[in-house]
């Protein structure tokens, strides 16, 4: 079977933001299913979303990728942008890091 180069792809015509949201949805679904290695590849696509970063941090933690988890944690804890995602994710994430540091 020959696949034509002009064949419609599901992502064809999507904006960058739509592609990132699709990646976040796929990554979140895979993480919820415990498929962390597969989730990582989707979540790594969006480094500007606090929600993606938090899920990526969790996926790295679950797969034992401590250096990668630490790098994401550092970026996420320092993240500040006037968005709804930042308001919902970052303050609680910072508090959880403090709590973990106090009770290792």
Image: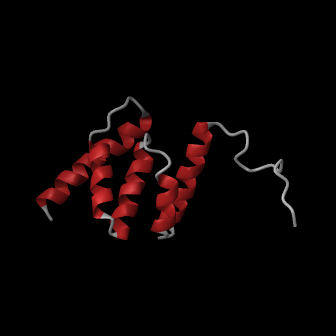
Left or right: where 27 falls relative to 5: left
From what the image shows, is residue 93 above or below residue 84? below
Near-viewer residue (36 or 6)? 6
Left or right: where 19 falls relative to 36: right
**Residue 81 place in picture, x, y as percent:** 37, 31
Q: Residue at x 17, y 52 (%)?
A: 98
Q: Residue at x 28, y 42 (%)?
A: 91
Callout count: 0
Q: Residue at x 27, y 39 (%)?
A: 78
Coloring scheme used:
secondary structure
From what the image shows, is residue 2 above or below residue 90? below
Residue at the limit of the structure toward the right, as seen here = 1
Near-viewer residue (29 or 64)? 64
Q: Residue at x 27, y 44 (%)?
A: 77
**Residue 22 place in picture, x, y as percent:** 60, 49
Query: In which quadrant is the N terminus drawn?
Result: bottom right
From what the image shows, is residue 93 above or below residue 69? above
**Residue 19 place in picture, x, y as percent:** 61, 44
Near-viewer residue (6 or 77)? 6
Left or right: where 103 falls relative to 27: left
Residue 63 placement: quadrant:
bottom left
Left or right: where 42 falls relative to 57: right
Near-viewer residue (29 or 70)? 70
Residue at the limit of the structure toward the top, as seen here = 82
Residue 60 placement: quadrant:
bottom left
**Residue 104 place in picture, x, y as percent:** 15, 65
């Amino acid at each position: 079977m020959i696949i034509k180069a002009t064949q419609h792809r599901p992502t064809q015509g999507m904006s960058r933001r739509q592609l990132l949201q699709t990646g976040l949805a796929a990554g979140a679904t895979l993480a919820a299913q415990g498929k962390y290695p597969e989730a990582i590849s989707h979540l790594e696509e969006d480094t500007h979303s606090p929600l993606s970063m938090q899920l990526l941090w969790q996926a790295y933690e679950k797969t034992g990728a401590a250096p990668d988890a630490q790098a994401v944690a550092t970026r996420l804890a320092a993240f500040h942008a006037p968005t709804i995602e930042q308001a919902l994710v970052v303050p609680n994430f910072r508090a959880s890091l403090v709590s973990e540091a106090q009770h290792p």
